[in-house]
Amino acid sequence: MSITENIKKYREELGDQVTLVAISKTKPESDIIEAYNAGQRIFGENKIQEMTDKWESLPKDIQWHMVGHVQRNKVKYMAPFVKLIHAVDSLKLLKEINKEGKKNERVIDCLIQIKIAEEESKFGISADEAREILKSDAYSGFQHVKVTGLMGMATFTDDMEQVKKEFLKLKGVFDDLKKDFEGIEILSMGMSGDYKVAIECGSNMVRIGSSIFGER
Ligand SMILES: *Cc1c(COP(=O)(O)O)cnc(C)c1O
């Protein structure tokens, strides 16, 4: 199927309840334009340089999400335009985003990445660490960054029972934090291979790359 057909299919399938982030990393601008012309406005990238280059040359009503691991010294490049940073994993990083948000006179929305996978390689922090950050005086003082939800990645496996267990764990953490902290609304979980399970488990934002744009 073409990119246009894929976007239409996903938009129909997901409806209004689940936000589609089209993950365009490594893909050419022509692919993004095709998805844009099919109505897609939210795109995700995992490298700040690549996202910034694409932001500069593509239509300005695109909302850019950073889904990859973020190095503090690169926050400044995306601070003028990034719509949502999915993988925040420390108070230090929030502090840097707050600083750059202030310089740009904006509030930058972020998700905290919770580690749910068993694999060692996955980034993220524990539910307790997330809670510590949200209730800290430092975070309360930040006026240019706002945590609006959580993000997580399941173990890369065909064992959907395992994936489901991990997503349900994240949904539990999300529900707990949502009760105690204002503004926690987004639960970003699910990719091409596991988005159906993620939605069953309560996801309201999915990040889909290869099954829209083809293998990378
Ligand atoms: C690449 C990537 C995706 C999309 O993965 P696909 O399997 O291609 O859908 C989603 N989330 C993150 C964080 C990614 O880096």
Image (cartoon, grey):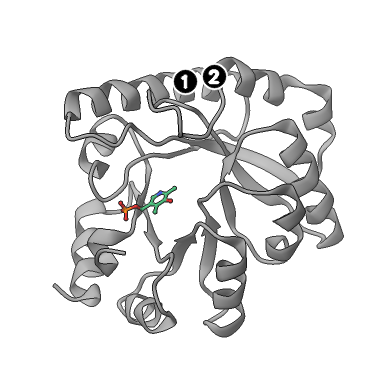
Residue 2 in view of the camera: yes
Q: Position of residue 191 (x, y in %)?
A: 31, 47
Q: Quadrant of residue 141?
A: top right
In the displayed structure image, the side of residue 89 where residue 3 appears, left or right: left
Badge 2: residue crowd in 10 Å (few <14, some 14–19, many ≥20): many
Q: Nearer the viewer, mark 1 or mark 2?
A: 2
The N terminus sits in image quarter? bottom left
Contact, CB < 8 Å: mark 1 with mark 2? Answer: yes
> Closer to the camera, 109 or 52?
52
The C terminus sits in image quarter? bottom left
Say what amino acid the circle numbered 1 marks: Val
The residue indicated by pointer 1 is: 173
Residue 11 in view of the camera: no
Q: Position of residue 71 (x, y in %)?
A: 68, 49
The residue indicated by pointer 2 is: 127
> Closer to the camera, 73 or 105?
73
Say what amino acid the circle numbered 2 marks: Ala
